[in-house]
Amino acid sequence: MHFDADSALLQSIVDDLAVQGWSQQDAFLPDALIAQLATECRAREAAGKLAAAAIGRGDGLAVREGIRGDRIQWIEPGQSEACDLYLNALDVLRRAINRSLYLGLEDFEGHFALYPPGAFYQKHLDRFRDDDRRSVSAVFYLNRDWPVAQGGELRMYLPDERTLDLPPLAGRLVVFLSGDFPHEVLPASHERLSLTGWFRRRADAPL
């Protein structure tokens, strides 16, 4: 699979980020790749490779299911063909954002996230207080035939006290500025799968 960095899809994401700081794009990847990624996520869970996600950093890192209930595993190049295709698509997007918005995004980090029924993630920001390298968040959903009544929406807190609830529909990519948009994951009645990650800028050199 190859993405043209000048495609209308990527340009729409860039334009949305410039104007409103977030973008929602459906059908970001082909159905066949979505199915492969969903199968891989479930296979990793069945093999015991997904672990309870923690919050915080360093000595403060802790699993707190009352705040966050998903199970995750980080993805790296070379783990599978499906993950490599996904990472390639995100890298093309990274370069498109850099070319137009000059954000200096250097790399991408991401993981599979599986939310068991009833699990949620309370309102939070994706940027650490002592580390602002995470600049742009990207969430890609893998849930086929997802009825809205099942819940599991990404609730984004927009300016002027507005909220936006986005169902986790397969093929949907949500991108937003990491430090500007508090958000939460609402509980769902069924298992919820996604790939969650962050485009990061280069860390400031120590003085």
Image (cartoon, rainbow, N blue to C red):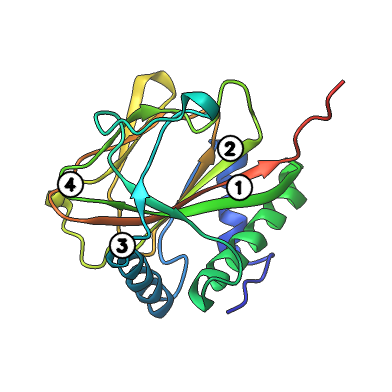
Q: Callout 1, which amino acid?
A: Asp
Q: Earlier in the sequence, mark 3 or mark 2?
A: 2
Quick one: SS at disc 1?
helix
Element type where label 4 sits in the image = loop
| Badge 2 element | helix
Nearest to the eye among marks 4 and 3: give it.
3
Q: What residue would you read off at disc 1? A: 15
* Callout in the foreground (1, 3): 3
Q: Give the residue at mark 3.
A: 45
Q: CA distance from mark 3 to mark 2?
A: 38 Å
Q: Residues within 10 Å of mark 2 (few under 14, many from 20)?
A: few
Dot 2 or dot 4: first in sequence order is 2
- Between disc 3 and disc 2, the foreground one is 3
Task: Pick whichever of labels 1 and 4 is earlier in the sequence.
Answer: 1
Rendered image: mark on residue 188: 4
Residue 119: x %, y % from top left: 21, 42
Q: Which residue is mark 2?
A: 19
Whole-number angstrom distance, CA of label 1 to CA of label 4: 31 Å
